[in-house]
Amino acid sequence: MDPYTYVVIVSALALLAYYFTLLQAGLARGRFKIEAPSHSGPPEYERYVRAHHNTLEHLVLFLPGLWLFSYAVSPLWAAGIGIIWPLMRVGYALGYYAAPNKRLRWIYLSMPPIYVFVLGSLIAGIIELLGV
C-alpha cells in the first residue's frame, strides 16, 4: 500500500472533525433560535460558534502542514503524528460545549502536531537545500 494512503485517511478525518463542529454550530443555531447572519446569542450558543471557527483557523495550518511534512520527511510519520489532531479537536469541541475551561487540555494537545509539521518541513527543506 502507498504510504500516502495514511495521510489521505488522516486528512479525511481532519475534515470530518471540522464538519462535526460545523454541524454542531448549525444545530445550535436552531436550538437557540439564532437567525442568520447573526452569530450573537447566549454564551452557550457562542461556544459552539467559537469551537467551529477555532477549528477552521487551526485546520488551515494543519492540512498543509501535514502534507508538507509527509513530502519533506515521511508520510508514515506524518500520519502517525497527524492522527492526534482530529481526535483532540473533537475533544476540544465537546469540552468547549460543556464549559470554556474544559477546552484547554484538548487545544493544548491538538497544537503540537502543527508545530512539528511546520518546523519539521522547514528544517527538512533547509537540509535538502544545503545538501546536508
Image (cartoon, grey):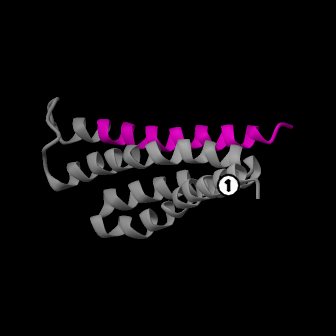
Mark 1 is surrounded, within 10 Å at the Cα level, by few (under 14), some (14 to 19) or many (20 or more) other residues, namely some
Quarter of the figure with the N terminus: top right
Q: Residue drawn at (14%, 31%), measured in percent from left and top? A: 35
| Res 30 → quadrant | top left
The image quadrant that residue 71 belongs to is: top right
- Percent from the top left, x then y, of residue 80? 70, 55
What residue does disc 1 label? Answer: 124
Amino acid at the residue labelled 1: Ala
- Which of 7 and 15 lies nearest the eye of the viewer? 7
Residue displayed at 16% across by 30% down: 37
Where does the magenta region start and end?
1-26
Q: Where is residue 23 in the image (x, y as percent from the top left)?
A: 38, 37
Residue pictured at 31% horizontal, 70% vertical:
101
Does dot 1 land on a helix, a strand or a loop?
helix
Residue furthest to the right in view is 1
- Tell me if residue 12 is in the magenta stretch: yes
Q: Residue furthest front?
A: 130
Magenta highlight: main SS: helix
Q: Report x, y in % for residue 12.
A: 60, 37
Residue most toward the top? 36
Q: In this view, does 96 lie above or below 125?
A: below
- Give the image location of residue 2, x and y in percent: 83, 37
On the question of residue 83 being in view, the answer is: no
Residue 105, magenta (yes or no): no
Q: How many labels does the image show?
A: 1
Question: Is residue 70 shown to the viewer in this render?
Answer: yes
